[in-house]
Image: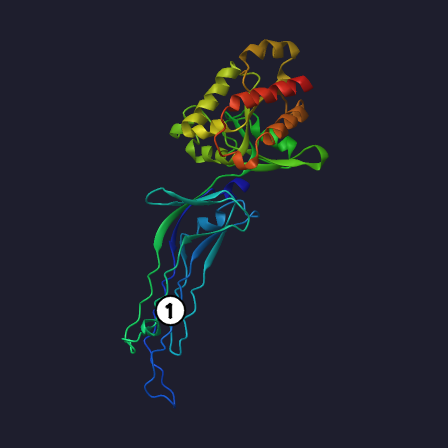
Amino acid sequence: MAEQNFVDYVKICCRSGAGGAGSVHFLQDKHTSMGGPDGGDGGRGGHIILRGNRNVWTLLALKYRKHVIASPGVNGRGANSSGADGEDVILDVPLGTVAKDAETGEIEFEITEHDEIQIIAPGGRGGKGNAFFKSPTNQTPRHAQPGEPGREEWKILELKVLADVGLVGFPNAGKSTLLSVVSAAKPKIGDYPFTTLTPNLGIVSYRDEKSFVMADIPGIIEHANEGKGLGLRFLRHIERNSTLLFMVPADTDDINREYNILLRELELYNPELLDKPRVLAITKSDLIDEELKEMLQPTIPKDIPYVFISAVAEQGLMELKDLLWESINSVPKDTFNQHIANPHRMMHGSRSKSSEEE
């Protein structure tokens, strides 16, 4: 049911409200039969606004709402009475939502903070009444501005999951099992590829009542950057994760080869992903003994901190949490999306430190 409710892509038609027309009116009362201009301005048309909400985790509410229409502004009236503004339409969206123009594909903005507000379709401005146009040389203007029309545009909203740690691996690498063990999340688990079809989030408890968010992302296959498998649809979720946890089963033929395939898929999709801190977890280690672990050493990448784990047997999980916590806090949060000069040296240093602690 949770997978059916998770929606990370919607296309909607946004129609903002038209501005109200200005009024052409002249003052008339029992004391003044031919007064000056007093036509008020028209009201602004309603905006369509996106608002970040940390309590919303899917775009499901917009999936069946293809047309979002804001109300127009009210026309101006006499006695310098301005028309009321049209009512804005506010759409609550999850943090990590990206708004794009449907025709050009251009990214307009993204929502990353709670209660952050961005106007996706501004309402038309209200027209000026004839009182605005009076001057010493034109004391009785008999014209006013019409209101600006509203905008009608198709927009694409994409959700990129925000998490501290993103799980990266081939299908059936044990990602969902790990998340279910270290957090209270209950992702679907099965002995077949692509069991996970939607991202799952879980809060992982750490020492001294600390915690971090882990995202289980559907498996990646070779040539995923070209759209194979679940392809580009879920690669975008990796972009907003602070640290990438690569997961490779211990019973694979060549750990280094499988790791490099995953790394290349991320590089072809977005080279900036290589700037993120990385940790390698060799999963299903309960299937091998210490002697086999020694034999696997030559096939393990040298430029990344690693740990042998077994989610089922709960082996190596605290060591994994230590590595992840160190990685999450190794780079200031405001520089996660910026280019890191030498990420390999930073990771190698982290590995050396963790090795000394062991």
Kindly identify the residue that appears in the image at 48 percent across and 16 percent down.
Answer: 257
Between 190 and 165, the residue placed more toward the observer is: 165
- Name the residue tied to disc 1: 42
Q: Quick check: 255 above or below 317? A: above
Q: Quick check: 77 above or below 309? A: below
| x and y percentages locating residue 100 in the rendered image | 39, 44
Taking the view exactly as shown, the residue that stands out farthest to the right is 208
Taking the image as shown, residue 25 lies to the left or right of residue 210, namely left
Q: Quick check: 341 above or below 27? A: above
Residue 202, image quadrant: top right
Q: Residues within 10 Å of mark 1 (few under 14, many from 20)?
A: many
Between 139 and 174, the residue placed more toward the observer is: 139
The number of callouts visible is 1
Q: Quick check: 224 above or below 142? A: above
- Residue 283 makes an appearance in the image: no
Kindly identify the residue that appears in the image at 36 percent across and 67 percent down.
Answer: 20
Taking the image as shown, residue 3 lies to the left or right of residue 19, namely right
- Residue 260 makes an appearance in the image: yes
| Colour theme | rainbow
| x and y percentages locating residue 290 in the rendered image | 65, 12
Kind of residue at disc 1: Gly
Between 25 and 14, the residue placed more toward the observer is: 25
